[in-house]
Image (cartoon, grey):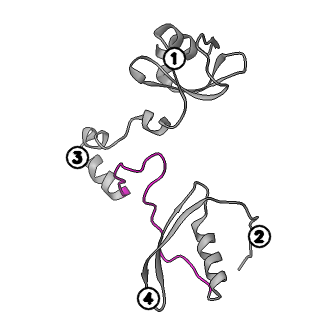
Amino acid sequence: GEVFEVPEREVDVTSIELLELSPASLRLRITCGSGTYVRSLVRDLGEALGCGAHVASLRRLWVDPFRQPRQYTLDELQGLGGQGEDALEAVLLPIEAGLADWPAVALDKDQARRLGQGQALRLHDPVPPGDIHATGEGGRSLGLAAVDAEGWLRPKRLFRWAAEG
């Protein structure tokens, strides 16, 4: 019974496809950016049409950068877990897959060790200032770091194994 006022904000909606139309409902495929509240979008569409609208079911098909991998339901994951750890591990993506869109800086063994110890590194090759994905040998992710205007790389959030190098 409470009414909540939600502040308006700009969202990115790439497409709205009408998949199915019946007298009482319609089915849409909406391609939108992160942070878009689909229920609010549907409510706004209903208001614009003068009939009101609500979401009967909502299914996320993908999240950037994970457009191609298969998504699993909780029941499917629990079933795989019952088959043993190897079955569950076989469907997991590497951590690096989630950082594919980040600018990356590859570090040698000594640099990776120093970063893992929390030390700032002076980069010899020019790298634009900002947040980066730090990788070690073989492209393994060490974590997130930031490059300042003077070319110093400083750790922000590192994975546990970054300190083991």
Q: Tell me residue 90's x, y (percent).
A: 28, 40
Quadrant of residue 137 within the rendered picture: top left
Identify the magenta region. Answer: 52-74
Marks 1, 2: nearer the viewer: 2
Residue drawn at 50 percent across, 15 percent down: 107
User: Could you say whether the residue bearing mark 3 is in a helix, strand or loop?
Assistant: loop
Marks 2, 4: nearer the viewer: 4
Task: Tell me whether circle 3 and circle 4 mark residues in contact (CB < 8 Å).
Answer: no
User: Could you say whether the residue bearing mark 2 is in a helix, strand or loop?
Assistant: loop
Task: Tell me whether circle 3 and circle 1 mark residues in contact (CB < 8 Å).
Answer: no
Of callouts 3 and 4, the N-terminal one: 4
Marks 3, 4: nearer the viewer: 4
- Marks 4/1: CA–CA distance: 58 Å
Residue with the mark numbered 2: 5
In this view, 88 is above or below 135 = below
Disc 2 marks a residue whose amino acid type is: Glu
Residue drawn at 35 percent across, 54 percent down: 72
Residue with the mark numbered 1: 163
Marks 3, 1: nearer the viewer: 1
